[in-house]
Image (tube, rainbow, N blue to C red):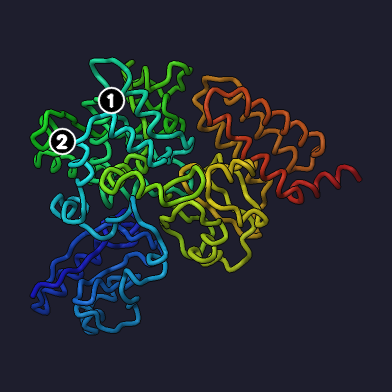
Amino acid sequence: MTVKVYVPRDSAALSVGADEIATQITLEAAHRGVAVEVIRNGSRGMHWLEPLVEVATEGGRVAYGPISPEDVSGLFDSHFLNGGQHPLRLGLTEELPWLRNQERLTFARVGITDPVSIEDYIAHDGYRGLHRALAMAPAAIVQEVTDSGLRGRGGAAFPTGIKWKTVLGCEAGQKYIVCNADEGDSGTFSDRMIMEGDPFVLIEGMTIAGIAVGATQGYIYLRSEYPDALNTLNEAIDRARKAGYLGSNILGSSHRFDLEVRRAAGAYVCGEETSLLESLEGKRGLVRFKPPLPAIEGLFGKPTVVNNVISLASVPIILDKGAGYYKDYGMGRSRGTLPIQLAGNIKHGGLVEKAFGITLRELLYDFGGGSASGRPIRAVQVGGPLGAYLPESQFDTPLDYEKFSEIWAVLGHGGIVAFDDTVDMSKMARYAFEFCAVESCGKCTPCRIGSTRGVEVMDKIIAGNQPAKHIELIRDLSDTLLNGSLCALGGMTPYPVLSALNHFPEDFGHQVSKSAA
């Protein structure tokens, strides 16, 4: 009997030798005359255990990890193909606390299926949402998404259904669906994991969006640093097209929708939707003035839905299970689940998908296991390089868009970067200005000039040069950036700067005291 062995093809696993592990298992099995089928799945999201190898047994899939090439022979000696005991045996994968305590909706198949097998996708409830959508009126599809409470998972948290309804209501000979896959926030990797681990869920979500609003062409604007995702997406798109899930007359219907991947320009600002559209049109990635909104005049001046990967990948389960099913997860106006990424100084980094309402403390300690250094976690930055720094006193804040807004913070893309008590928050505030200066498109003065001046003033504070005076100048400058910038790059730079200053004054205060003395 052929035994199925799963070795991830995810970039995180590849970076620590997953390809070599897969080769070694194949060679060792051949040497021993054992029949194995090595399946390259996505990552389960437990990055500290990569490469994680799973073996299909009668009792379920058994996990071993982290595996090195030198371990392979010993695994065979320990009868790991039958789930045998070994120091690296972790037990049944689904029973591991990290996975057992999650609510995986968007990531339901990631780590379970072969990412480029359309048969595997369908066998695990794939394309059920599309089949239902094909039997619905476009306005009914939009209403289902609206009723689910799905909001944009890219940062602004704008209701997805409202954006779709706007595009549906526009009269135009051509409409577009654009997926923002330019995942550039620090500590984020959920988009990459979907594209590498379950690309068909994104393809299905974009196809449903196209049918809902009358768009016939879609583009995935992919971060240029994601070559593995590029290859996986292109292979999956080709297979979907050949199987009749893309192109003309989708599944024998009158609907047409096609899709292609475009490489991003390598600029952080191109994650902003209007700058992205400029880049997609072959221009320099500069932010557009709004109005008009992209939903009315977007790509090539046509009505365009712009959503990020997780937003679109959440659509198939909403159409399959219904708006009520999805809305049952979460709290307040934050419905459904959020793929949360734990990174930085954290013992167990990786991806956790949970319903809105879980607290930062639960994520950092119940899932993350505390800091990797063993020292107290002093601060976390949530929402990428433009997100606020939160102190330990705010770790009990539930993950909810409105609750975060109340403490002047953002959830953004769900990335959480942890710092222990050795961090110097004055330097982190300086970095926020430096990041903005480097990544600014240069179109508006507050962002272009303000960020550069911010670096200079922070250097004076850190050097102890009249810090009290310069801290006031930083606050004044932040107000200008917050209210005068054309887009969120400049407009959100004050979040990390002022939160560091407000929550960790001691990292600035000793210079103030020295000056006052």
Q: Residue drawn at (58%, 34%), measured in percent from left and top?
A: 492
- 228 lies left or right of 405: left
Q: Which percent across, then down, holds residue 172?
A: 27, 15
What's under tag 1, amino acid-wise?
A: Tyr
Measured along the vertical axis of the image, is residue 40 above or below residue 262? below
What's under tag 2, amino acid-wise?
A: Leu
Please tell me which residue lies in front, 163 or 319.
Answer: 319
Q: Which percent across, then down, holds residue 516?
A: 89, 43
Q: Residue furthest right?
A: 517
Q: Is residue 496 visible?
A: no
Q: Which residue is mark 1?
A: 176
Find the distance from the CA under tag 1 to the CA under tag 2.
Answer: 15 Å
Mark number, residue 148: none
Q: Secondary structure at mark 2?
A: loop
Quadrant showing the N terminus: bottom left
Q: Which residue is mark 2?
A: 246
